[in-house]
Amino acid sequence: MRLLKFGMVCLLAAGCSQADKDRGSIEAPEGMVYIPEGSFHMGAKSTEAYEDEFPSHEVSVSPFFMDATEVTNAQFAEFVEATGYVTIAERDIDWEEMKTQVPEGTPKPPDSVLQAGALVFRPTSSEVNLADYTQWWVWTIGGNWRHPEGPESTIADRMNHPVVHVAWDDAVAYAQWAGKRLPTEAEWEWASMGGRKDIKYPWGNESAENASDKANFWQGKFPYQNYVLDGFETTAPVKSFPANGFGLYDMAGNVWEWCQDKYDARAYESYQRKGAVEDPKGSAQYYDPRDPYTPKHLIRGGSFLCNDSYCSGYRVSRRMSSSKDSGFNHTGFRCVQDVQS
């Protein structure tokens, strides 16, 4: 037993030394960390996995830089100030464009529904059918990144919180302005593990039930009873919880993070047929059999709303999709940058 423990300590020390060497030898841009190249089994790592997390497949990822934290309100405000950018949630909805994303013959909704706004989470008063998300997501006119819970709310005291109500197009616009891009799904999953393999969560394998000090997520009974054991009812300031082995904060919980990839529920089947895949960029088409008319992109990492009873989004392999033109008050992003050879 002592020999086994000694061997494990040596392996861990060697791994840490190599990781420290990699990070120390390459200077990362301000606010970013160096993510070394590596190979891993991407996809389902537990019996809790959803169908689109299968099959697990071998992936290799080249080195890159990644934002240490999710993009904050302060950073996004700087972008808006510099460019005059208006997010999708701040624009009235174009019905002619919307018609292309719904079944033919769908009647035009009331004008009030087409006013600028966003979906905002509202807890229910009691247990509800978890298959019906309309019971806790409420269309809120005036909800946007400046007003996360609606027009009466403010981010004045949340400038170091992650920006929310950011659609995929908004995140791409910010990334381009910053000279960066969104991570691929493979890059995101590799980074979330912090240099470790065969772990279930970014913090390791400790159950979510005992990890309220590891990340910001829902403790209690979703969507009506939150014990707030982590100290935060909604978003938390970035860096409120420990970083992973690569120095990345909030890779689990706080807010979902946009990825570059189009959502295709069958993508992993395609990867497995190809054998080991290097730097996958995602599917060429959108495919969600549950919602075939809506173009969606991947989001990863879970949010302050995730719970084992609902989405368990904080698992490293958990895939979730979201309409590319929609923002929610639990969705943000972080950026990556290529390492120049």
Image (cartoon, rainbow, N blue to C red):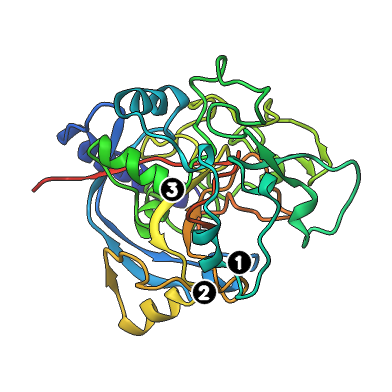
Q: Nearer the viewer, residue 235 or 100?
A: 100
- Can residue 306 be seen here? no
Tell me the amino acid under the disc marked 3. Ser
Q: Residue at x 65, y 23 (%)?
A: 153
**Residue picked out by circle 3:** 192
N-terminal of the two: label 3 or label 2?
2
User: Is label 1 in contact with label 2 (beta carbons under 8 Å)?
Assistant: yes
Residue 310 location, quadrant: bottom right
Q: Secondary structure at mark 1?
A: loop
N-terminal of the two: label 1 or label 2?
1
Residue 140 location, quadrant: top right
N-terminal of the two: label 3 or label 1?
1
Q: Residue at x 54, y 26 (%)?
A: 146
Residue 54 bears which disc, if any? 2
Q: Nearer the viewer, residue 84 or 68?
A: 84
Hey, which residue is sitting farthest bottom in the picture?
Answer: 273
Q: Residues within 10 Å of mark 2 (few under 14, many from 20)?
A: some
Q: Nearer the viewer, residue 36 or 218?
A: 218
Q: Secondary structure at mark 3?
A: helix
Where in the figure is residue 340, as x and y percent of width and height? 11, 45
User: Is label 3 in contact with label 1 (beta carbons under 8 Å)?
Assistant: no
* Rendered view: 21 above or below 291: above
In three-dimensional space, the C-alpha distance between marks 3 and 2, rounded to whole angstroms, equals: 18 Å
Where in the figure is residue 218, as x and y percent of width and height? 71, 40
Q: Residues within 10 Å of mark 3 (few under 14, many from 20)?
A: many
**Residue picked out by circle 1:** 49
Q: Residue at x 16, y 36 (%)?
A: 26
